[in-house]
Image (spheres, rainbow, N blue to C red):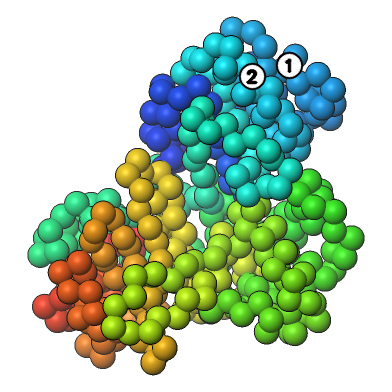
Amino acid sequence: MIIMHSMRALPRAVGTALRDRLAVMPVVVLTGARQTGKSTLAEHLVPEPRRYHTLDDLDVLDVARRDPEALVSGSQPVTLDEVQRAPDLLQAVKRAVDRERRPGQFLVTGSANLLLMRQVSESLAGRASYLTLWPMTRREQQGEGRHGAWEEIVAARDEEWLDLLAAQPDAPEDWRALARRGGYPTPTTTLRTSSERAIWFDGYVRTYLERDLQDLASISALPDFRRLMRAACLRLGQLLNQAELGRDVALTQPTVHRWLNLLETSYLAVRLPSYAVNRTKRLIKSPKLYWNDVGLALHLAGQDDPTGAHLENLVLHDLLVWRDARLERAEICYWRTAVGEEVDFVIETGRRLIPIEVKASPRPRLADAAHLRAFRAEYGREARAGLLLHTGSQLEWLAGDVLAVPWWRVL
């Protein structure tokens, strides 16, 4: 998949998965936050001729609500863009597929998770395959059209990791610069200064609050909602306590719960679950709170200097892109015990676990690996070696079971 910008075509990590699913399923649903590149992918990259209808066009939106059959009928494949603006259109898509099922018949995009929207009564079960387009990864921004080296890490034996990552062609990069520009295509590939990106992010937030949010729920207290967004972005990487968050922004816990659900439905907030298998230790079950794009999170929080939590968020974003583009499902969680042992991320593939710790430090030490080693001791043979991602250049085994690796050799 590509984003057309300034005569450049930037491939996307989800491209192969999208083509594979269009060749098999009658409906492919591509969702993600607004401005991640969904519309451009749907309009310009799918190879065969298709009818294209965007519900951002008010005339098309009117037809979708009055006569949806007019948009979905015919033998030519159809792309329906921003379908969350008329959720009932999916009923017409279902009827069309049931009349004649063809691979690639419909490509549907939406700036909200259609499976989480209360207004959507039709899940297209058995008819659709779902994909998520996240903001651009570092390697997508570099034109490689991929995520980090997670697939290679999962496929290789633990003892091969050092040579595998040493062979990565990447050069050192300032992670703070990556955090500030984020991954949305326009501020990433077009805008060069922090003031230009601030103008874009401000317009993005206004559009989300004043229009996109209203497609999901009728909210009149927009200043309160924006205050909640800011408070959430100031808590990246922290355990989510909705009652405490509500006290800080003078909102009730039920309101905080409902509004966080809206942020998650529109792919802005990310709630990372805890690893659920309990052995001998009492585990913390509350999710941790992150954001879909670190650049947007910094803007909303009014922060200029990224912190270690923002580096964690960059790693999580890359992991989510990898997870959602692969055919075999992987789970991304965190691990924390009641006594304070914590691992930032756990990759679960099959019955194997890879624990990952992220440190915004250029000089990793053996003490930094303590929680990774505690995790491995807890889960025994199920746990593979640990990865300690850091901001320096050191690539070596800190211990026999923990590899210290610069973040830029993985992402």
Write down the quadrant of residue 318 in the picture. bottom left
Circle 2 residue:
95
Q: Residue at x 38, y 58 (%)?
A: 331
Residue 94: quadrant of the picture: top right
Q: Is residue 264 visible?
A: yes
Q: Is residue 203 above or below residue 377?
A: above
The image position of residue 352, as x and y in percent, is 23, 61
Report the residue at 69% width, 40% height from top: 120
Helix, strand or loop status at disc 1: helix
- Quarter occupied by the C terminus: bottom left
**Which residue is painted at 28% across and 55% down in the image?**
349
Question: For this view, does 406 lie left or right of residue 190?
Answer: left
Foreground of the two, 129 or 110 = 129
Position of residue 311 relative to residue 112, above or below, is: below
For marks 2 and 1, the one nearer the N-term is: 1
x, y percent for residue 124: 57, 31
Query: Three-letter amino acid code at disc 2?
Result: Arg
Judging depth in this view, the residue of 358 and 173 nearest the camera is: 358
**Residue 228 picture location, percent across and down:** 73, 72
Report the mark closest to the observer, 2 or 1. 2
User: Quick check: 157 left or right of 51?
Assistant: left
The answer to whether the residue labelled 2 contacts the one labelled 1, judged by CB atoms less than 8 Å apart, is yes
Question: Tag 2's secondary structure?
Answer: helix
- Label 1 sits on residue: 69
Residue 13: x and y in percent read 41, 42
**Mark 1 Cα shell of 10 Å, populated few (<14), some (14-19), many (≥20):** some
At label 1, which amino acid type do we have?
Answer: Glu
**Could you tell me how far apart the alpha carbons at marks 2 and 1 are, in whole angstroms?**
9 Å
Left or right of residue 319, residue 109 in this image? right
Front-most of residues 145 and 160: 160
